[in-house]
Amino acid sequence: MRPIAAIAALLAVWTANAQRHAITINAETPEGALLQQIGQESDEAKKIALLEQFAAQHPKHEGTPWVYEQLVAAYTKAGQPDKVIASGEKLLAIDPEDAETAHACLKAALELKRDPDLVLKWAVITSD
């Protein structure tokens, strides 16, 4: 039974970390309707476009950190390191304690861009 409990605990931690920036959607507002549309979109390119639209139109909305978190993940998956880093920087400006985003930017600099200066920059930011 102990291994099962340990696995369950690890899954709980992983699930909690998967959505660091939770949001509440009020579909009766334009922002909420757009967030709902984002959540329902299955085409990755269209979803990225909707996320970018939300970030541009509603930079001060409480859901913006969640949007940037989604963009970092989507750009990573799409192999777009410059956009990973740009979105990561915007998210870190809102939530400077988000170590996972800093780490995602470090990985983008290391694995996708292979830029030693950028790796050094993000290694420092991540360790801070």
Image (cartoon, grey):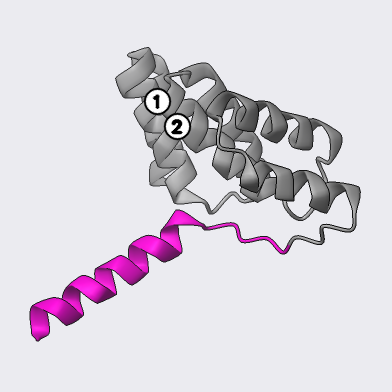
Q: Which residue is mark 2?
A: 105
The residue that appears at 66% across and 48% down in the rendered structure is: 65
Q: Residue shown at 80%/31% (left/top)? A: 56
In space, the residues marked 1 and 2 are separated at their CA atoms by 5 Å
Q: Secondary structure at mark 1?
A: helix
Q: Label 2 is placed on what type of residue?
A: Cys
Task: Give the prevailing secondary structure in the magenta stretch.
Answer: helix
Crowd class of label 2 (few under 14; some 14 to 19; many from 20; radius 10 Å): many
Which residue is at the front of the view, 20 or 100? Answer: 20
Mark 2: which secondary structure? Answer: helix
Q: Is residue 48 above or below residue 31?
A: above
Res. 16 image quadrant: bottom left
Q: Type of residue at label 1? A: Ala
Proximity of marks 1 and 2: CB atoms separated by less than 8 Å: yes
The residue under label 1 is 108
**Is 107 or 55 nearer to us in this picture?**
55
What residue is rendered at 56% in x and 43% in y? 69
How many numbered discs, if any?
Answer: 2
Give the x, y percent position of residue 116: 33, 15
| Picture quadrant of residue 55 | top right
The residue lying toward the viewer, choosing from 4 and 100, is 4
Residue interval drawn in magenta? 1-24
Q: Is residue 31 magenta?
A: no
> In the rendered image of this protein, does residue 15 appear above or below residue 95?
below
Q: Position of residue 89 (x, y in %)?
A: 60, 33
